[in-house]
Amino acid sequence: MKRRLLARLRPTRFERKILVALAVVALGSMAGALLLVGSAVREAYRTGVSASFAEELASGAEAHRENLLLLRALTRLRADRVGEDDALEDALAQGDLETARARLHELGEDDPRLEKVAIDDRVLVTFERERDEGEYREVIERREVGEAEVALHFAVPESIFEDYQRAGETAELYARLLDRQDFVSDTYVAAYSAAVILIAFLAGYAGVFLSRRVTDRVRALVHATRRVGAGDLTVRVPVQSDDEVAELSQSFNDMVRDIADSRARVEYLQRIGGWQEFARRLAHEIKNPLTPIQLAAQEMRDSYDGEDERYRARLEDATAIIQEEVATLRRLVSEFTDFSRLPKVQGEPADLRDFLLEIARSVPPLLVDLGAKDAVHVDVAIPESSIPVEIDSMMLKRAIDNLVRNAVQAVLGSERGTGHVWVTATHDEESVTIEVRDDGPGLSPDELERVFDPYFTKKREGTGLGLPIVKKIVFEHDGSVHAEPSPEGGARFVLRLPVSRARLA
Ligand SMILES: Nc1ncnc2c1ncn2[C@@H]1O[C@H](COP(=O)(O)OP(=O)(O)OP(=O)(O)O)[C@@H](O)[C@H]1O
Ligand SMILES: [Mg+2]
């Protein structure tokens, strides 16, 4: 299963060529794009990530740091001033908290960041300050004042720390980017290339699947051609859609059908040739002893001069039978000879209308000959205007005569013993079609297959050569003939002569 799938995915030689063509177009433009993108990325990077910008960033970060250090120094300075104040120390030593509070107010009033002051963890002074919104960080400076510990609580805006941190990080990141400039742009280009290659592969397979709709049909043609080459003329390829491949398939089918037709024709004509030779020899072999047999019989009858009347009568009877059978054999010999000497068809310009008139004229004597004058009605449809064709009128008439003769005989032999026979002719751009049909007993499927075989007959005095002669004549006109049931329940024989032979003006 997996292997089948893989085999299905693997492109054929034809598909590989299509793919190569597609790839040359697609990959060519992709390679161009890749080159452009690569240099564009590098260029953009070089412009964006520059050393002077890195320096600017670094000095910005430094400024933030100095700001922070300054703040720190200021808070320390303030704490030192409080820690070294003698008046405060005295007040605290005496436990005079009121004086201490007043002194602390004086010492800290002018520092907007000082929030409160605690003595031994007890808040003594709280400053009321107007303050901007935002977060503040508490920074505590402690100093020993005499026995007591004074803690100064400062509120420093959080943004000062954050700004410093962020500026530092940015500067550092930028420095790193600057360091690895080539690596980063190479990575971008590599990732882009990988994406392009992946897309190219996917597009390639999509291409295979799409092109398969065409290549599958070409492959079917290749396969069919091989089979024809191996002698199989029954192959046909499906004709879907209306593109060039469909046209090719249609021509292929037509070609194979033509080859099959002409091969069948050639084979049949070869076989007929063999039968003609056989009929010629048979006629020859039978014909020679017929006269001696006839003479011997007469001789026997005439030379008897005995008195036995009964014997004489038997001799007369026997001689009559011999004469009769010899006459039948002579007729057979003449038909065999006729068949063996069948001339080749020679097409000449003619008028199909005249031809059918001639057929119609020959019908009454034929009916008389067959003893069907009142029993069978033969209807020959005469075209209104002339239809110029190229045929061998004499031979084709012989063929139509055979068909009409058979049809009349079939109607006569039916249970009713009466009926109709129709002869019609139609034509289109490609061919002339002549049809002889009847409402007789018709043919069984088995008979339909065998009627054109030589010596196939169901009549006591038939030779079974009538239809083979018809087929030979039609084939020599490059046409075709077949038998089928007629709509009236009898048989229908259809002759098709191509325009190349039966040329229309
Ligand atoms: N129109 C028809 N309806 C029914 N059967 C037919 C018809 N035409 C031909 N057949 C059958 O096909 C057989 C072969 O016909 P074909 O003309 O080759 O020989 P035949 O008529 O038997 O002999 P011959 O032509 O020498 O008289 C006939 O014997 C008959 O059984
Ligand atoms: Mg016949």
Image (spheres, helix red, strand yellow):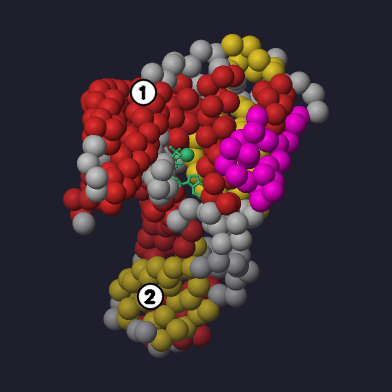
Note whether 143 is above or below 172 in the view shown: below
Amino acid on which the number 1 mark rests in the picture? Thr
Judge whether residue 325 can be spotted in this image: no
Disc with the residue nearer the chain's start (1 vs 2): 2
Give the image location of residue 327, x and y in percent. 37, 34
Give the image location of residue 420, x and y in percent. 66, 49
Q: Report the Cα–Cα distance between label 1 and label 2.
A: 149 Å
Residue drawn at the location 45% of the way across and 84% of the way down: 123
Residue drawn at the location 35% of the way across and 84% of the way down: 120
Q: Name the residue under label 1.
A: 337
Note whether 95 is above or below 77 in the view shown: below
Q: Mark 2 points at which residue?
A: 151
Disc 1 is placed on an element classified as helix
Judge whether residue 447 can be spotted in this image: yes
* Closest to the observer, 289 or 2: 289
Residue drawn at the location 55% of the way across and 66% of the way down: 134
Disc 2 is placed on an element classified as strand
Note whether 211 is above or below 501 in the view shown: below
Query: Position of 499 compared to 483: left or right?
Result: right
Give the image location of residue 193, x and y in percent. 33, 33
Residue 379 on the magenta segment: yes
Note whether 262 is above or below 329 in the view shown: above
